[in-house]
Every structure is written in C-alpha cells, then in structure tokens.
Amino acid sequence: MFRTHLIFGVFISLLLLNLGEWYYVFLFVLSGALLPDIDFSRSKVGRKFGFISEVIEFLFGHRKLFHSLFFAVLLSFIVVYFFNFNYGLLFFIGYLSHLVSDGLTKEGVRLFHPLKYKIRGMFRSGGSLEFVFFIFFIVLNLFLVYNMWW
C-alpha cells in the first residue's frame, strides 16, 4: 500500500541522510519508493498519473516490468545521467525498498522479469500484518528523528 511504501521510504531516507542535503535525499528515495506503482492505475500513484498509468498498465501489466531490478537499474542510470551518481543511488535504493516490501507480500514480485520466478512473503497487501509493519516503521522513524535532532 502507498502509505507503507511511503513510511518505509522515509525510514530508508533517514538512514541515508549523510549522502546529501536532506531534501534531496527524501526527494530521490521517496520518488524511487513510490514510482513502481505507476503500473497500477488504481494505486494512489497511478491515479495521480491518470491516463499515463492506464497505458503503462495495459502495455506492461502490474508488478512486471516496473517491478523488476532491470527497470530499477535503467531508471537509476537515467537519474545519474540527468543529476549525479548519489541521486541515482538514492533513487535506486528507494526503488529497491519498494521491490523488497512488495516481495514480502503473498502476491510477490518478479524481480527478474520477464523470468517467471517470483519472490513471495507472508504479508497480504492491506492486511493486518502490513498494518503492524506500517506502525513499526512509524515508531522506528520517530525514534530516528528524535535521536538525530534531540
């Protein structure tokens, strides 16, 4: 779910604050953490991109190309080309955090698309275990913020 990817992306950002200005860290990590769901038109990100998301979903399907390591690397190289290595790395780490968290769900993720092999976990998207995961990372984020600034 969007909120889980967001809060997990914030956690990763807090861990990586030493790689650059805090606002760039958050911008690139969170962009990477949220972008993969552009391939699902009913996701929060997909609804923001409207027709573009519908076309991507029609052409590529959900949790296929946009949820692969190949595509994560490709987009990260594009970020490196237009910005710099650190921002590309931050984007890749954010993107990878999305793929890892989707890999923890029962629906799983095909990291090596187009190969059929799926990585699956025990969580159901939107289920009670995901909610526990979400709350855990909120608490962890608050702990990290408290220890950084106080």
Image (cartoon, grey):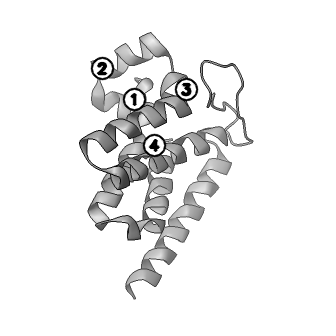
Image coords of residue 59 (percent x, y):
43, 11
Amino acid type indicated by mark 4: Phe
**Residue, disc 3:** 63
Image coords of residue 124 (percent x, y):
67, 38
The crowd level at tag 2 (other Cα within 10 Å; few <14, some 14-19, many 20+) is some
SS of the residue at dot 1? Answer: helix
**Residue, disc 4:** 2
SS of the residue at dot 2? Answer: helix
Q: Earlier in the sequence, mark 4 or mark 1?
A: 4
Is residue 44 at all visible to an observer of this figure?
no
**Residue, disc 1:** 38
**Residue at the image point whose x is 32% and y is 65% from the top:** 20
**Residue, disc 2:** 52
Q: Residue furthest top?
A: 59
SS of the residue at dot 3? Answer: loop
The crowd level at tag 3 (other Cα within 10 Å; few <14, some 14-19, many 20+) is many
Say which quarter of the image contains residue 117.
top right
> Position of 124 compared to 4: left or right?
right
Amino acid type indicated by mark 3: Arg
Label 3, label 2: how many angstroms apart (C-alpha)?
16 Å
Q: Earlier in the sequence, mark 1 or mark 2?
A: 1
Q: Residue furthest right?
A: 122
The crowd level at tag 1 (other Cα within 10 Å; few <14, some 14-19, many 20+) is many
Q: Do tag 1 and tag 2 residues touch (Cβ < 8 Å)?
A: yes
Amino acid type indicated by mark 1: Ile
